[in-house]
Image (spheres, grey):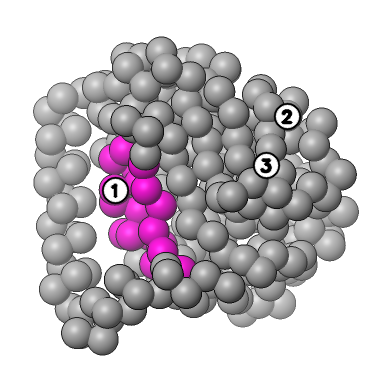
Amino acid sequence: LGELSVLYVTVLARAVTAAGYNPEPLLERFGLSYQALSTPDARISIPRFMRLGEAAIGLTGNPALGLTMGQLSRPVDAGMAGLAAQSAATAGEALNTLIKFGILTSQNSRGTPWLSGKGLTANFYSIKPYNVFNYFVVDSVLAAWTQYLRIVSGQRDVLERVNIEYPSRGLDAEFEAWFGCPVRFGAAGNSIQLLSPIKDAPSLQAQPGMFDQLTRQCERQLLKIRSNWTIGDRIKDILAPSLQG
């Protein structure tokens, strides 16, 4: 399926701690240590991360742990892409930067996120079939994007609506309260749609010089990753998203 930066594991551990549990025994069970988590270049396979997330939900008893992960996400948790996005001029440009360079911390054979609707809709690719091992992945990604918009814009209400591909699990009210907008389960895809004014809302942490410098660093890292791809890797990148299910 692919792999993720251990930065995402640190967010999961933070969510477990926030629920009142010690994450260390859980991490040790999966062969992880805080020393390993302190190395941003370290990676964890997506299936292993999914098993870790399912175990964390079992430990905390919170099926909406993905929302907690999103709430506790910080720009730095998205690595260099997060720092670059943080310094963008507007909230919309920040989200675009975050998604554009997402491959620096997450590579999934199922596809890559994208923007549509003139930059007002952020889409997360399908990871169906859905089960207890991957519901939280969709929740955490959409919630992290939402939290990012809230951080850079300084506003709580940033979304028009949320679409989630998997069917309702009886948590509709909790999700709508957290996202602050209607949430449609069983939708055709996974996405968040921004309120129109949010796209052009000035970022509270805009810094043009740093944005230019950090995005250039991201471009170099992206080029380095893709330059090592074989022809097979390139074919997989193009075809795999079409093989949903």
Query: Which residue is drawn at the image coordinates 42% and 68% (left, top)?
Result: 241
Q: CA distance from mark 3 to mark 1?
A: 23 Å
Percent position of residue 52, x then y: 67, 69
Percent position of residue 210, x then y: 17, 32
Contact, CB < 8 Å: mark 2 with mark 3?
A: no
Q: Nearer the viewer, mark 2 or mark 3?
A: 2
Instruction: From the image, tell me which residue sits under label 2.
Output: 176
Q: As shown in the figure, which amino acid type bears the numbered disc 2? A: Glu
Percent position of residue 32, x then y: 59, 73
Residue 241 tag number: none
Q: Nearer the viewer, mark 3 or mark 1?
A: 1
Residue 105 is covered by the magenta coloring: yes
Q: As shown in the figure, which amino acid type bears the numbered disc 3? A: Leu
Side of 196 relative to 164 (left or right): left
In the displayed structure, 160 sits above or below 71; it is above
Instruction: From the image, tell me which residue sits under label 3.
Output: 67
Mark 2 neighbour class, 10 Å CA radius: few under 14, some 14 to 19, many 20 or more: some
In terms of secondary structure, where does tag 2 sit?
helix
Side of 86 relative to 135 (left or right): left
Mark 1 neighbour class, 10 Å CA radius: few under 14, some 14 to 19, many 20 or more: some
In terms of secondary structure, where does tag 3 sit?
helix
Q: CA distance from mark 2 to mark 3?
A: 11 Å
Mark 3 neighbour class, 10 Å CA radius: few under 14, some 14 to 19, many 20 or more: many
Which segment is the magenta one?
Answer: 95-115
Percent position of residue 200, x then y: 32, 17
Query: Which residue is drawn at the image coordinates 83% and 60% (left, top)?
Result: 59
Q: Say which label, 2 or 3, has the lower sequence index.
A: 3
